[in-house]
Image (cartoon, rainbow, N blue to C red):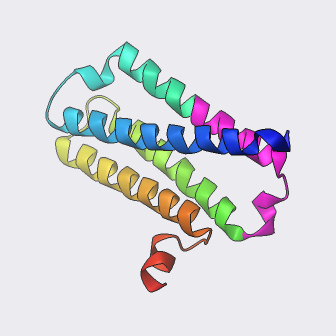
Amino acid sequence: MITFYPDIKLVHIAAAMISGSFFGLRAMALLAGMRWPRMAPVRYLSYTVDTVLLTAAFMLLTILPKALYANGWLLVKLCFVTAYVVLGILAFKPKRRTVARAGLVVAAALCFLQVYCIARAHHPLGAFYLLMG
């Protein structure tokens, strides 16, 4: 399975960028008062992209199982991914005030940015490490 590692990693990176971009697009539209971000086909597309992202992540962990514990960056990244998902779910819940929704969107976007920086730096501090380095 190690021979498929580069391909799986490419799928994972592409799905991560699509997921973040799609979240940003949906969040901006939702904050602008549009209804389409909560429509079923849009939600299902989001779920599909995130499922591909997580499946690729678990496949990469299956190929290199010790990577999760070898250094702390991957574990921290998984914690921020969890926060990104939870904050994103909360942001798209109906009957939220715009201020609360905007705060949740910003918090989710910051988590996504930190996940990206952790992945690029391979360091638990992510953005802070890149800024110091």
Q: Is residue 59 shown in magenta?
A: yes
Q: Is residue 128 found left or right of 91 in the rendered image?
A: right
Residue drawn at (51%, 58%), measured in percent from left and top? Answer: 115
The quarter holding residue 120 reads bottom right
Q: Position of residue 103 (x, y in %)?
A: 27, 52
Name the residue nearer the viewer: 83 or 51. Answer: 51
Q: Which residue lies furthest to the top in this view?
A: 41
**What residue range appears in magenta?**
52-71
Name the residue nearer the viewer: 95 or 51. Answer: 51
Q: Is residue 99 above or below residue 92?
A: below
Q: In which quarter of the image is the N terminus?
A: top right
Q: Position of residue 119 (x, y in %)?
A: 57, 60
Q: Is residue 70 shown in magenta?
A: yes
Q: Is residue 55 found left or right of 92 in the rendered image?
A: right
The quarter holding residue 92 reads top left
Q: Is residue 110 found left or right of 76 in the rendered image?
A: left
Name the residue nearer the viewer: 9 or 25. Answer: 9
Residue drawn at (41%, 22%), measured in percent from left and top? Answer: 43
Q: Position of residue 29 (x, y in %)?
A: 21, 33
Residue drawn at (82%, 52%), measured in percent from left and top? Answer: 64
Residue drawn at (68%, 39%), measured in percent from left and top? Answer: 8
Q: Is residue 96 found left or right of 133 in the rendered image?
A: left
Q: In this view, does 103 lie above or below 41?
A: below
Q: Which residue lies furthest to the bottom in this view?
A: 132
Q: Position of residue 81 (x, y in %)?
A: 54, 50
Q: Main secondary structure of the magenta part?
A: helix
Count the marks. Answer: 0
